[in-house]
Amino acid sequence: MKISVLGMGYVGLSNAIMLSTKYDVICHDIDESKLESIEKRQSPIKDKLVSEFFKNKKLKLKTSIKINSEILESDFIIISTPTNFQTSTKMFDTSSIDIILRKLSKMKSTAIIIIKSTLPVGYTAQVNDRFKNLKIYFSPEFLREGRALYDNLFPSRIIIGNKDKYSLKFVTIIKSVVRKRNIKIVYMPSTEAESVKLFSNSYLAARVAFFNELDSYCLGNYLDPKSIIMGLSSDPRIGEGYNNPSFGFGGYCLPKDTKQLHSSFGQIPNALVKSLTLSNLQRKQFIVNDILKNKEKNIGIYMLAMKKDSDNFRESSIIDIIRLLKKNGRNVFIHEPLINNKKSIFGCPIINNFDLFIKKTKLIVTNRASKKLNKVSNKVYTRDIFGEN
Ligand SMILES: NC(=O)c1ccc[n+]([C@@H]2O[C@H](COP(=O)([O-])OP(=O)(O)OC[C@H]3O[C@@H](n4cnc5c(N)ncnc54)[C@H](O)[C@@H]3O)[C@@H](O)[C@H]2O)c1
């Protein structure tokens, strides 16, 4: 059994590692530095379990910068390349997948292709129609960054587009490497599977937006959001989790997937889905207005990452907060140890010396509270109520 994984980000790497505990896996990416670090068994992403597996497990992993014959003749090829939202077309940019499929078709690959990237609804059916010599399936990915390998080893569910001998075979392979017993497997047409992914992330975005609007309501009425949220969340139909206010929903997936879902609705009425992006934007503007009530000229931003243990700040809500604070004439200084090769970002100086950072700024804005800020808690602005992501 040979499996190739194309695109070594959070999705690709965690899947490749999990599969390579049992099967021969070839990792491909256009970014040579990622492949070099995989060869050295060093994780290119921050993920405790990935580092642990690299250190302690015998992984049957190798890399290739080219789509070579070994990849073409694999039993399975998993595609996990980016699908960013393009504002001009109001659609995901699927070009990284299009390029790969064109190549695989031209080079007559015999592999079963499983797309894990998040897709616009209908994409898999279209490419199966276009590339008749390929067998293409879609299986949405539900991992959380920072826990990518864990979420793959203990998946909430496995969904795969279309039930036939190939998808059944793929599921058997996944079942043989995951750690969770009795996993829920759901087969459905690929277009439905694509919809599941977009609706899942839009539901999560809606939930974040809802609790953020609750928090804005409390700010506007001088009410205590903690009591209100705890009161709501004790109803089992509402539940706890994903109820901690923030500056807005962000990260790589939620903002782009909600936009794509809205676009997929086309002419079908969708007041709720349509409003998610606006709600998020309004929340950030409202937070900025609240911050601006403090007349401090120099504002410190503690960390750019969305979540506490994240290793990137793609689409972080705080980026818009920074932009709006600057637009309102404030001097913004950033403390972000993830950035160690730059003196400034978004036109703001970076101060990674923590003592200097807290000395320079009398108001510190952070999306998520941190123990490190306890000693200066009197100058911290956050909407983090429960101290969790
Ligand atoms: N990050 C998440 O939490 C998450 C969760 C579920 C689904 N997804 C989806 O999975 C997909 C990948 O997300 P990610 O976070 O792993 O992305 P990423 O940006 O971390 O990694 C993508 C990788 O693909 C590589 N790449 C780009 N073009 C390529 C090409 N033509 N050939 C080979 N490699 C190429 C990049 O160099 C990069 O290493 C996206 O569609 C995303 O929406 C992401």
Image: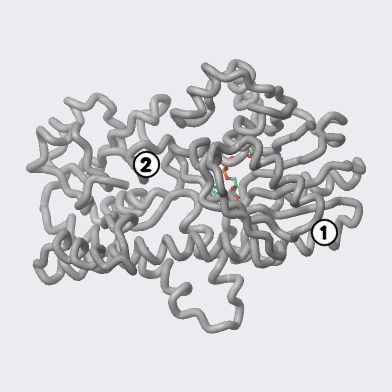
List the residue tagged with mark 1: 128
Residue sitting at 42 percent across and 35 percent down? 311
Mark 1 in CB contact with mark 2 (< 8 angstroms): no
- Judging depth in this view, the residue of 89 and 230 nearest the camera is 230
Q: The residue tagged with tag 2: helix, strand or loop?
A: loop
- In the displayed structure, does residue 379 sit left or right of residue 370? left
Residue sitting at 27 percent across and 30 percent down? 351
Question: Residue 104: x and y, percent?
Answer: 84, 43
- In the displayed structure, does residue 169 sit left or right of residue 193? right
Relative to 6, say whether 168 is above or below.
Answer: below
Q: Which amino acid type is shown beneath numbered disc 2?
A: Ala
List the residue tagged with mark 2: 305
Q: The residue tagged with tag 1: helix, strand or loop?
A: helix
Residue sitting at 66 percent across and 53 percent down? 139
Question: Residue 152: x and y, percent?
Answer: 55, 41
Between the residue at mark 1 and the residue at mark 2, the CA separation in whole angstroms equals: 38 Å
The answer to which of marks 1 and 2 sits earlier in the sequence is 1
- Judging depth in this view, the residue of 267 and 296 nearest the camera is 267
Image quarter of residue 208: bottom left
Question: Residue 293: x and y, percent?
Answer: 12, 58
Q: Which amino acid type is shown beneath numbered disc 1?
A: Asn
Question: Quarter of the picture for ligand 1?
Answer: top right
